[in-house]
Amino acid sequence: MAPRPLRRTLGGAFALILLTGTAVLANVQANASDPTVPRFDNVFVIVGENTEILQINGNTMPYLTKELKPDSAWLKNYWAITHFSTANYVAMTSGQYTPCEQFDYKPARCHQDVPNLFNQLTDAGISWTAWNESMAEPCSLVNNGTAKERNFYAVKHDPAVYYDGVVADGGTWDAENPSALCTDNVISMGDPVAPNDTSDFDAVLASGDVSRFNYIVPNMCEDGHDTCPPNPPSALGQFDEFLQREVPKILDSPAFTENSLLIVTFDEGASTAGGGSSAGGTPCTAWDSCPNAFHGGGHIAFAAVGDPVIAGGDYRARADHYGLLRTLEMGFGLTTFVGNADEATPITEIWG
């Protein structure tokens, strides 16, 4: 059976809210001044690459803007933390980052023994999966695939493998022998050889047997980073096509229950202003060689879909990856907040 259109998928939930009023909304905040975040059932976070919010429109990303945005809470003042990619993925899941991660070095060089969301969920008995499209084998710590074959997995976009608490077995970091926690939970979305394959993820969605937290990273041909053959509309267009293919499967899954949430956002903005080069345009090669190079991560898009949110609105309160992390921690009932999430303001104004 073909997936239902997005509006039909969400329409029943909105009708139920209108009919039952406060009974359905008993577990969410009453107003934007209340810092409470609703308790989430299952959460799906999809992360795209290197895109400023001003680059997103009906021509560049028609599905996101014309289909998903109207049924979402759309944050107009959401910001990445820094440049470049790895630092933002790590910031989003641990509330901090290092100079090593600013330069997108691999986890063998940058791995950290720090508190992070994945270990928080494990300790709380909450299931999670980091889905990485085209990853060659579970818990892979190196790149694989090519743009030509449309199966390019970049480890720099996979934050889970940068944490000792996820990868290290018995506290010892060994790239050749990662922990069972990592090999069980940091996995490919499908066949790593086939182009743009998400068959394993799709099968799990169809069955409804998903983890409560799902961190979804498309490959480099479908995340907005690269333009890959054969003659796609654009890098952003390929990410839009990924969303058009996968979002309806998420929303139609038995796992997308009443208090479930889908988030679509980006790691950072594409602007190089204050991020990546010295004033003279020479690429940065060391942390202190261009002191202003990594200030600010760009103004990016953020859409949240699901019954807990007030859909169809544009929200203007400032938010960032640290605030997202704090929001996820609160939504899963965690009572401690890692890194800068401890001081961050959670996202509150979007809830019903």
Image (cartoon, helix red, strand yellow):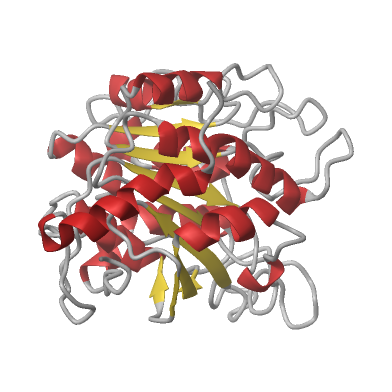
Q: Residue at x 35, y 41 (%)?
A: 163
Q: Nearer the viewer, residue 54 or 18?
A: 18
Up/down of 47 relative to 150, above or below: below
Q: Residue at x 42, y 22 (%)?
A: 206
Q: Residue at x 69, y 55 (%)?
A: 62
Q: Residue at x 52, y 26 (%)?
A: 189
Number of numbered tags placed on the structure image: 0
Q: Nearer the viewer, residue 136 or 245?
A: 245
Up/down of 98 relative to 213, above or below: below
Quarter of the figure with residue 304: bottom left
Quarter of the figure with residue 195: top right
Query: Is residue 110 visible in this depiction of the protein?
Result: no
The C terminus lies in which quarter of the figure? bottom left
Which residue in the rendered view is the most extreme toward the right? 231
Up/down of 280 relative to 207, above or below: below
Query: Is residue 132 visible in this depiction of the protein?
Result: yes
In the displayed structure image, the side of residue 64 where residue 306 appears, left or right? left
Q: Residue 150: give x, y in percent of width and height.
A: 74, 29
Q: Residue 169: give x, y in percent of width and height.
A: 28, 24
In the displayed structure image, the side of residue 275 where residue 267 appears, left or right? left
Q: Residue 61: give x, y in percent of width and height.
A: 69, 56
In the displayed structure image, the side of residue 268 where residue 318 appears, left or right? left
Quarter of the figure with residue 21: bottom left
Which residue in the rendered view is the most extreme toward the front? 19
Q: Residue 267: give x, y in percent of width and height.
A: 54, 57
Q: Nearer the viewer, residue 10 or 303?
A: 10
